[in-house]
Image (tube, helix red, strand yellow):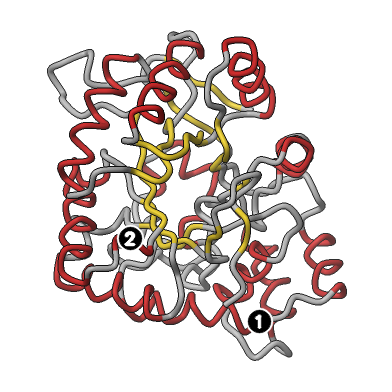
Amino acid sequence: MEYRSLGRTGVKVSPLCLGCMMFGGKTDPKDSYAIIDKAIDEGLNFIDTANMYSRGRSEEIVGEAFQRNGKRDQMVLATKVFWRMDNDDPNMQGSSRRHIIQQCEASLKRLQTDHIDIYYIHRPNSEVPIDETLRAFDDLIRSGKVRYGGTSTFSAWQFIESLWVSKELGLNRFICEQPPYHILDRRIETELLPMAQTYGTAIIPWSPLASGLLTGKYRRNETPPANSRFENHADHPFQREQYNDRVFDVLGGLEKIIETKNCTLSQFSLAWCMQQSGIASPIIGPRTMEQLEDNLKAFDVEITEEDRQKVDQLVPPGTFVSPFYTADFGPHQFRW
């Protein structure tokens, strides 16, 4: 496997990152251990979780898996902090120093490790000055509990602000950004990707399969499969925006492209994301071993210039047909 540089750092990561959001929820521990072991056996050295996934259970399972297989030291382990962890305590959320330090300690215990390789602030937060967040991350890095800091779903200007504050105050800078990015939402190509390439920032896309819209499981005018992400999309305003007729127009065009590619829609979509300029390591989120095996076959798919041009005709660069680049901050709604 050809490993890639993680931005300006000396760390090398696999072209796909194993996301663990399903572990401890729809995927039980036994299957989760097996998926982690299989991913490592296939060469993936990058694993991503978060404290809020299944209220800490995902981190616990990842920690248990490393205790079982003894592979912690060869993995680049990432987790995140931001979302509420206690329904009754208003301080158990956000990007304050108090919450970040507290939750880092809790994550280390759940993960059964003495350090986190990449610690992400899970969303930006206008209520807390970025210098408070950066100072907390800097202290964690200087203490050895965190190796690098990163962000998730920051806009280009927010990330640049963080770089400026880091420089002004002499703090460790964020080294990577984790945005939503896939064929159906290409908006990061307008500002975020050029910014990242200019400043040596690694881009680690989340939801490269658009929450399953790019897997082929959904069909126009058909009821979504039971237990799927969009099964009850009509009851959720944001999902209603994502699940629209324009999406199915694009899916029809993609199906024509893959007719001669000998691959599935999900494999093509992952390969497209992996092979886009400026992308370090898209995060896959398999629920089952079958899904992992399908995802891994994306390594065998070559995206030609003709393929890129056909995708560009369906969804022009920098545009979208299904909105994913949106974040909800409780009482505030921040969209770009």
Q: Which residue is mark 1?
A: 301
Q: Quadrant of the C terminus?
A: top right
Q: Is residue 176 left or right of residue 39?
A: right
Q: Position of residue 201 (x, y in %)?
A: 65, 40
Q: Is residue 190 above or below residue 91?
A: below
Q: Position of residue 195 (x, y in %)?
A: 75, 35
Q: Give the amino acid at mark 2.
A: Asp
Q: Is residue 256 above or below residue 180?
A: below
Give the SS element for disc 2.
helix
Q: Give the amino acid at mark 1.
A: Val
Q: Which residue is mark 2?
A: 73
Q: Residue at x 56, y 50 (%)?
A: 204
The residue closer to the viewer here, 58 or 286, is: 58
Give the number of the disc on residue 100: none
Q: Residue at x 40, y 49 (%)?
A: 233
- Residue 191 falls in which quadrant of the image? top right
Q: How many marks?
A: 2
The residue closer to the viewer here, 276 or 198, is: 198
